[in-house]
């Protein structure tokens, strides 16, 4: 996360609004910003619930992180994911 990048943080949808493409719309809005502003990439820390959404949008997994309180059996798994815009071919106008 630095210059030339966007990081999505705390992207969530209320249960009654899930499966209506609101999360996809927010992601695509940010993806358009990356392209419009000629940024390098976009990243997100995906929960297990969000991983499928990001994968379908073209994000790729970079690293897996496990968050666990010492002495507790329960843990949270987060997937660091990245999306890079596809370079557009140069114009061939003559």
Image (spheres, grey):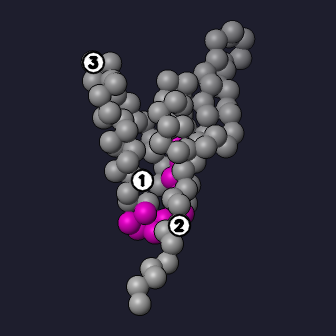
The residue wearing badge 1 is 31
* Disc 3 from disc 2: Cα separation: 37 Å
Q: Which mark is residue 23?
A: none
Give the structural element (helix, strand or loop) at label 1: helix
Coordinates of residue 45 in the picture (x, y in percent): 55, 38
On screen, residue 17 above or below 79: above
Give the structural element (helix, strand or loop) at label 2: loop
Give the structural element (helix, strand or loop) at label 3: helix
The residue wearing badge 3 is 16
Sequence order check, earlier mark of 3 and 2: 3
Residue at (49, 24) in percent of width and height: 49
Sequence order check, earlier mark of 1 and 2: 1
* Disc 3 from disc 1: Cα separation: 25 Å
Residue at (38, 30) in percent of width and height: 12
Which range of residues does the magenta coloring cover? Answer: 35-44
Q: Which mark is residue 87?
A: 2
* Disc 1 from disc 2: Cα separation: 13 Å
Coordinates of residue 67 in the picture (x, y in percent): 65, 25
Q: Quadrant of residue 51?
A: top right
Q: Nearer the viewer, mark 3 or mark 2?
A: 2
Residue 4 visible to the viewer: no
Q: Residues within 10 Å of mark 3 (few under 14, many from 20)?
A: few
Q: Quadrant of the N terminus?
A: bottom right
Q: Nearer the viewer, residue 63 or 25?
A: 25
């Amino acid at each position: 996360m630095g210059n030339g990048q966007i990081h999505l943080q705390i992207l969530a949808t209320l249960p009654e609004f899930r499966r209506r493409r609101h999360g996809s719309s927010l992601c695509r809005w940010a993806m358009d910003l990356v392209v419009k502003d000629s940024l390098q990439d976009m990243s997100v820390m995906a929960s297990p619930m969000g991983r499928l959404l990001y994968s379908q949008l073209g994000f790729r997994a970079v690293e897996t992180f496990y968050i666990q309180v010492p002495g507790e059996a329960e843990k949270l798994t987060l997937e660091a994911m990245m999306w890079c815009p596809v370079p557009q071919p140069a114009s061939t106008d003559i």
